[in-house]
Image: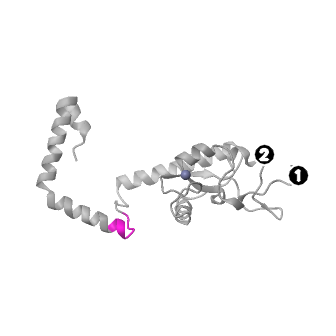
Amino acid sequence: MASLSTFINKLGKRAGRKAYNAYHQEYRNTHRRRIRAYNIEYKRKRGAGLPTKSTHGRAARKARNTQKHRLYVKARYAKQKGVGGSYTLQQWHALLKQYDYRCAICRKRKPLTADHIVPVSLWRTFYRPWIEDGTMTYQCNDIENIQPLCALCNSIKSNKLMGDGDFVAFREDL
Ligand SMILES: [Zn+2]
């Protein structure tokens, strides 16, 4: 579909915008039935909890790769800081489902990002929740130490400890 930038590049800012609006008005006028059918189908899918967008193709692949890239960045950061662990995209999606797609702190349904329950910066110094009977059960960047937070709660939390109660064992020797 012709994008706004295509029109602006061709005709300049003002005329381009005008032509773009006219083009889409025309499209809406000539495809009323098709748009209506699309909207009905979209609502049906949403109501049934089915994906509304294609799960294959370029856009979907790009979205998946963006998510994968974020995981990679997090794992690399954790490794740089000397803490290990990793989780898969599937584990992250399962976690979101477990939290009912809500932020772990404010419980609101907003866009969610992965947050380290025990922050990477504190993991080695103050806490070792991964030790049970002297055996390592999980590491900092494993899914057990990840919770979904909205952007607001994430920025408030920063590198402090907040969230679901039973996650941290204090080091007894501190
Ligand atoms: Zn929140």
Q: Amino acid at mark 2?
A: Thr
Q: Position of residue 118 (x, y in %)?
A: 69, 51
Q: Position of residue 158 (x, y in %)?
A: 63, 43
10 vs 128, left or right, is left
Task: Examine the image and state in which quarter residue 53 appears.
Answer: bottom left
Q: Position of residue 104 (x, y in %)?
A: 58, 57
Q: Residue furthest right?
A: 173
51 vs 116, left or right, is left
Task: Examine the image and state in which quarter residue 15 appears.
Answer: top left
Please name the residue shown 73% across and 49% down the image.
123
Please name the residue shown 67% across and 42% down the image.
80
> Dots 1 and 2: beta carbons under 8 Å?
no
In what element is the residue under mark 1?
loop
Write the start and end of the magenta stretch as one range.
45-51
**Separation of residues labelled 1 and 2 (CA atoms):** 12 Å
Count neighbours of disc 1 (C-alpha within 10 A) and say few if under 14, some if 14 to 19, many if 20 or more: few
Residue on which the image places disc 2: 125
Residue on which the image places disc 1: 173
Nearest the eye: 74 or 166: 166
Q: Amino acid at mark 1?
A: Asp
